[in-house]
Image (tube, coloured by chain):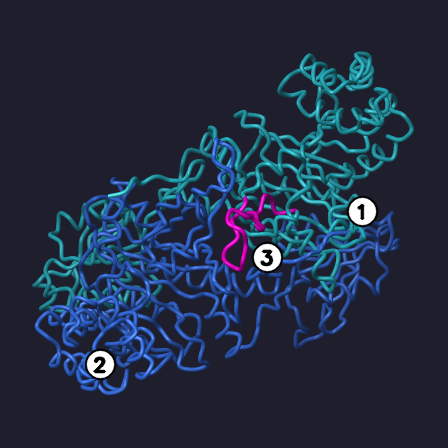
Chain colours: A cyan, B blue
Amino acid sequence: MQKVLLARGMRDFLPDAMRRRRRVIETVREVFERFGFEPLETPALERLETLEGKYGEEGDRLIYRVLKRGEGGEEGESDLGLRYDLTVPLARVVAMNPDLPLPLRRWQIQPVWRADRPQRGRFREFLQCDVDVVGSPSPVADAECLAVVDAALTALGLGAFEVRLNHRGILRALAEAAGAGDRETDVLVALDKLDKVGRGGVEAELAARGLPPEAAGRLWSVLDRAGPPGALPALEGLSAVNAGLPETGRTAVDTLRRVLAHAADLGVPAGRIRFDPTLARGLDYYTGAVFETMVVAPHVGSISGGGRYDRLVGVFLGRDIPAVGVSLGLERILAVLEETQGAGGERPAARVLVAALDEACLPAALRAAAFLRAAGEAVVIAPDPLPMRKVLRQADQRRVPFAAVVGPDEAAAGTTFLRRLADGAQWILPAADLLAHLGEDAPEPGPPG
Amino acid sequence: MQKVLLARGMRDFLPDAMRRRRRVIETVREVFERFGFEPLETPALERLETLEGKYGEEGDRLIYRVLKRGEGGEEGESDLGLRYDLTVPLARVVAMNPDLPLPLRRWQIQPVWRADRPQRGRFREFLQCDVDVVGSPSPVADAECLAVVDAALTALGLGAFEVRLNHRGILRALAEAAGAGDRETDVLVALDKLDKVGRGGVEAELAARGLPPEAAGRLWSVLDRAGPPGALPALEGLSAVNAGLPETGRTAVDTLRRVLAHAADLGVPAGRIRFDPTLARGLDYYTGAVFETMVVAPHVGSISGGGRYDRLVGVFLGRDIPAVGVSLGLERILAVLEETQGAGGERPAARVLVAALDEACLPAALRAAAFLRAAGEAVVIAPDPLPMRKVLRQADQRRVPFAAVVGPDEAAAGTTFLRRLADGAQWILPAADLLAHLGEDAPEPGPPG
């Protein structure tokens, strides 16, 4: 007998967990389709060169590499990697399919893999739920991303969440304001950690990256105009920060103003979106607006994030195609729903459990099951004959509301014994009458038939 | 600009292909649930030792190996592999979860990966659609596998298909009858190729494996009793072969007789199941009944296969748990459906395309779109202002039946211009009246409102 273990950071989803996941996925998918997004899927394995160099240094390190199989590859060589996100594969698809009508609006719900250090709530395989609009530079497309997330989270019943919005152009202007216009990435990486390490931590990081001490001071003097992140409504925060930014930041501010106005027209409630000039989002490929959604309580971090990446398709195609997209963090959303709405998912495996009391009664039981299934009912068959108490225990264990049992008497008379588990009501019926008695899981007000 | 290629043997699924796939998957899933199977998912990555040694020599060679990440692994070392099928992961899940109520009936639809040589219709990533009953030795469970496949293929509209049925015990008895009872695997592997290489090929294979020439002759003398594969109805074929088998084959024959009877009770049409004493199924882990479904035309090979594997869970658990399952070959089923029913899948991306004629009209257009979405309609928004002819071309290209356009006149009057593409009927309406006009894609008999 061999050791039996899951690979580290991996999970199985047993039936109850699967039902919870499927319910959330279906809700999200319906919202995506209501917003006119179309389905797309890409393979788990991509050529390494497709993946590498898009996610930043740390991202590249976390890509799972797959060994070459046969075909004369050197032992230990790798030319394939597991999908790290759904955005780079989308950019590849757009580059490879010049006939796709643009703008392409696609949704994609598939797992991605990251060889991250496993920790509570962080896994090495997890589902991403993405929508993207490829082929339009319009702020309407950015606003659509905000609106679709808002609609999806609302449809899931997540009440208290807020969106943080920023623009890479504002971060560039901030770096300039700090006198470090040529060190934009250093400023961005340092600022991105503000939430976790505070101002002191950011200052240390900037110093470690060789920026002069006065750079941080200049940063804070611009950022302080808007107060603590999210203190001012988005538009006012934008105006306050704008006043402290060099000219180069103005276009970005103007774009965000339009994104906010379009989002409001698309029905995103006022006050849901907050401007956060320190929001950077880790990934290398963003070029414009960036955004992220946080649940107000419980504190699980970001449950959705995205932004504009106008140059990623160009890496594959040789000419740029503007694009913007957003990803829903299904795992964290499920964690929030469990905490706020309870686990759920305890739905019955079927409507009826059909069983035979002995071997000779199996044919009649199977025919009854086939009859009910043909009528559209979900039916579990107990494959081995069982005594009545075990039938009822199995039905109970699986939350199946009805048990239909054939014993010798029923087999002889061509009938089935039907029992409703909720109240123990029971009937002996010919198969044709079974359906009419499966109507109600629980007792009706009047006496049962 | 970098080369832009898919990894070999991998595919993207663009929206039309995705809609076809989703329709088939949903149909299959509904049938699985009607049969009382419950959902389960396992991770793509398994420990190599979980996967290896279960699929036979060739199978092991086709497992994709993943490089160790960090954690002190040697460069080039591999301890993880990509899932090769859904059966071995299921056995691991059962062994790891002793509290799962048995029999467990689970469905699982997930991709698997095999580093096979890519060829027409064979891919390195493909979806498997499996149902299994774990925890019952009853032939009812085997019959359920036959019945659920029958119901799924019928629901998909595949008319002409037939099932080949055999039992590993019959193959054992055949090897014995050939005087090679100790060389069962050699006989099985050789016989499994009969379809492809004919009797001469099987004889050559047996000789190459060191079996005496008379072994083949003895094999044919038993098999000839049933005539060419599938010539006799299953029960008669069974009886004919049974008469030529040594005593050890009788239990297997008896089991198959019961499987056939139960399948009939479960509604599988008479004549659909054929007994084929040469059917072996490649995988190592089968122990009892094996079966495979072929489409009569077009000739695409097997579209479903499965069997009983009573010892696989024991490899992980230390004690055996009987199990039987079946897998639907989604890729081949889609190929058959395309050939017999046409590609299909050309469904509209949405019900309405909403557009603005100029920038100033965008807010009114977005509000109209938000109104329609809130009412449950699927709406695509053109993010950039477009002239009318481009709006209509985009709607046409995406098969969207209605275009709703806001120009300066409509914006001023608070109305929307609505056009039905099928017949060019058009209206100018306040938002509240839009919904009532989206009822019919094509003209109604009477004059439009």
Q: For mark 2, give the secondary structure.
A: helix
| Residue at x 18%, y 53% (from the top left corner) | A426
Q: From the image, state whether disc 2 or disc 1 is nearer to you.
A: 2
Q: Determine the residue positioned at 62% across, 20% down.
A: A196
Label 3 neighbour load within 10 Å: few <14, some 14-19, many 20+: some
**Residue at mark 2 shares a chain with residue at mark 1:** no
Residue B25 x/y as whole percent: 47, 61
Q: Which mark is residue B7?
A: 3
User: Would you call the spot at circle 2 few (<14 residues within 10 Å), some (14-19), or many (20 or more)?
Assistant: few
Q: Residue at x 42, y 33 (%)?
A: A342
> Type of residue at label 1?
Ser
Residue A146 image position (x, y, % from top left): 68, 40
What is the x, y in percent for residue B422?
Answer: 71, 72
- Image vertical order of residue A173 relative to residue B34, above or below: above
Front-most of residues A354 and A16: A16
Q: Chain of mark 2?
A: B
The amino acid type of the residue labelled 2 equals Pro
Chain ID of residue with mark 3: B
The kind of residue tagged 3 is Ala
Looking at the rendering, the stretch of residues picked out in magenta corresponds to A65-87
Residue B213, numbered circle:
2
Q: Which residue is mark 1?
A: A138
Task: Using the numbered discs, state the Cα–Cα distance from disc 2 to disc 1 in whole angstroms.
Answer: 77 Å
Magenta stretch holds residue A72: yes
Question: Which quarter of the figure is the C terminus of chain B placed in?
Answer: bottom right
